[in-house]
Image: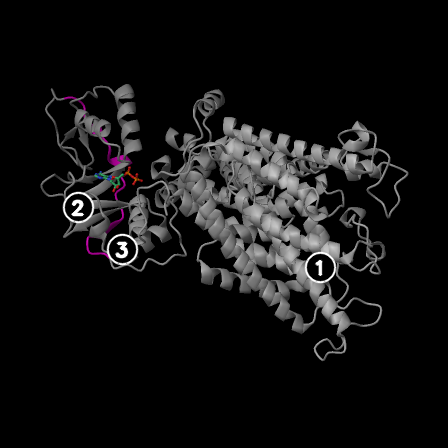
Amino acid sequence: MEGYSTHSGEGLNGTSKLMDFLDEPVPGVGTYEDFNTIDWVREKSKDRDRHREIASKSKESTWALIHSVSDAFSGWLLMLLVGLMAGALAGGIDISAHWMTDLKEGVCLVGFWFNHEHCCWTSNETTFVERDKCPQWKSWAELIIGQSEGPFAYIMNYLMYVSWALLFSFLAVSLVRSFAPYACGSGIPEIKTILSGFIIRGYLGKWTLMIKTITLVLAVSSGLSLGKEGPLVHVACCCGNILCHLFTKYRKNEAKRREVLSAASAVGVSVAFGAPIGGVLFSLEEVSYYFPLKTLWRSFFAALVAAFTLRSINPFGNSRLVLFYVEFHSPWHLLELVPFIMLGIFGGLWGAFFIRTNIAWCRRRKTTKLGHYPVLEVLVVTAVTAILAFPNDYTRISTSELISELFNDCGLLDSSKLCDYVSLNSSKSSNELPDRPANQNVYTALWQLALALIFKVLITVVTFGMKVPSGLFIPSMAVGAIAGRLLGVGMEQLAYYHHDWVIFKGWCSPGADCITPGLYAMVGAAACLGGVTRMTVSLVVIMFELTGGLEYIVPLMAAAMTSKWVADAIGREGIYDAHIRLNGYPFLEAKEEFGHKTLAMDVMRPRRNDPPLTVLTQDSMKVEDVETLISETTYSGFPVVVSHESQRLVGFVLRRDLVISIENARKRQDGIVSTSNIYFTEYIPPLPPTSPATLKLRGIMDLSPFTVTDHTPMEIVVDIFRKLGLRQCLVTHNGRLLGIITKKDILKHMAQMANRDPDSILFN
Ligand code: ADP
């Protein structure tokens, strides 16, 4: 069964793969023919047989017993390795991205490898209030023209900021284009497709992993409106897939491998946000297709190991795993649920708007000349992003820094609410504090925030889907956080100036804040992320793991639910499903209802005017007949019947098994020639001594292929395919074999019923 091992990995020959990538232009992913379908039922039964064999052997010798025990533990060991590898990679990505982001602004003279914050940590001259000011850290203007203030310095810094951004994004897109086209995007739509039982060659290979890791750092540092969270899920899945090659059990079984990949996607989120439980739930709610309890426990363990590894690396330097730790000091009031729900509505609207516009833009990219110039596109978008981002304080900093600042309790607005006071009292570490002067003009801040909101909304639409690794979580959260903060500030002002109103009675106690705008930012972020991805449970858990704000579950839940309702009312699909559809990936959606009244006979092949079904007969074919059949057709399997006349079904043989068996028999078995008879029967009639040896192939035949009758409603057939993970199903009439339905046939039929063109690359 060599075929299995070379399917989804990147094969053994790395150099030839490199050549493939260099020779090939960017592959136009999207035709169904690029994808192989796996058969869950068959893979699971293979695994059961393997277990039985190991169990029976384990009684024979101590060595076999050890083998059986190690086999049982191999799953956990694999999880440990995936967690360690993904955690280490994520740590490396975090550290490098932080450093390179700061490189856009300046350099550390003590050591160029220090980022801004670490540079000033090492300095004795740093004061607590001006933590980011130290003589060791030099802006580019200081270094090049020797000025730190003034218009020339500003222009110099501006120029350097844009140039670095362009350089980083150019490197990212060039590497992706030349070496690993699959490294672009977030990867989640493709991983969903793979987990649902398809094989995309090379998608989770070593080469993709390497290039995605490097280009992710570059893309994030370039300041484009994208995040590293989705791509980290892809990176973790690549780790899972590569490590599967170390264990025969997983290498040879596509269904088992998918269990590992489900766990790996949990690991991805665990390291992306420092949210292990959220990761497990994300895998369950959003990406996985088949998620038994065993996978849940393994995901939990892998996510734990990954989080632990990341924590040991301590990439944020704050000894905390979470990205946006918050500590609010005033409780929320029941009436605040109204603005929280309003934020939910905004999140839903944003989600629906984003999905529509982004899909329209991506479709444009595919169908017009725009798609022919990916490098130019990335450069133009980066230039626009950098040029517009620099003048605005809120967009110049990295998006995660912005979110962290918006979540913060201390005032963007009110200088009396000293951040430092709050921070010292709540023992926050220094890097979570906003570096903006507290006395900044209120209205400028609000204007800047509003402009940042418009900018983020528009630029994210064109950024997601470019040929660089790009995640959606962080930009969506940023949009929500800005909107939330604006609303929060508005509410705060209202409550402050009208504290005598009945509804605000008791909200503003002397010496304390009236309300917490940071909480609004947090709720807004959750709402917008929910609107785009349509996650609910996992979203709320990720949010409270991400911020440590366990008390705010109710506001978060209310916002997540409202945003899902609103977004679902406008368009049913989340962004990942929309991209699956756009790219024409063969994904059998478990949530979508099939409500049409068609029957199996309307879908089965062959169609009315097609040549008849290609079948094997159980005892009347010769080796050469079968070989001709194999060379003349491309079907991945053949039904076996009693005879052409009766068409009574006996079983089903996979093309791959047939090819391998005949090849092996020709090489190893004496007397097998082209005229040898092939038997799929149990009983082989005695043959005259002069006739050539016979080939018995009953062993490779599936004796219980799934069958339906031609009158079975397609609703039921679709359900069977979904629930059992079938690859194909045979259709009979009065016991006679009539046709075959494959998973792709079903997908094409569903597309047709929904008035979409089933054969086009663009599936919409
Ligand atoms: P897939 O649909 O996954 O590409 P195949 O390559 O096996 O799978 O089949 C290609 C098409 O040919 C499908 O539409 C299927 O219904 C049809 N088909 C499959 N096996 C046979 C067969 N033995 N004889 C005739 N048609 C077949």
Question: At x 24% / y 32%, what residue is drawn?
Answer: 697
**Magenta highlight range:** 692-713
Which numbered disc covers residue 714? 3
Q: Nearer the viewer, mark 1 or mark 3?
A: 1
Secondary structure type for disc 2: strand
* Label whose residue precedes the other's in the sequence (2 or 3): 3
Please say whether residue 475 is visible from this viewpoint.
yes
Mark 3: few/some/many CA within 10 Å (<14, 14-19, 20+): many
Q: Distance between the residues labelled 1 and 3?
A: 51 Å
Q: Is residue 396 above or below residue 539?
A: above
Question: Would residue 27 be found to the left or right of residue 85 on screen?
Answer: left
Q: What residue type is labelled 1?
A: Gly
**Residue linked to disc 2:** 737
Up-down: is 179 above or below 708? above
Q: Mark 1 points at which residue?
A: 518
Is the residue under label 3 in contact with that under label 1 (CB below 8 Å)? no
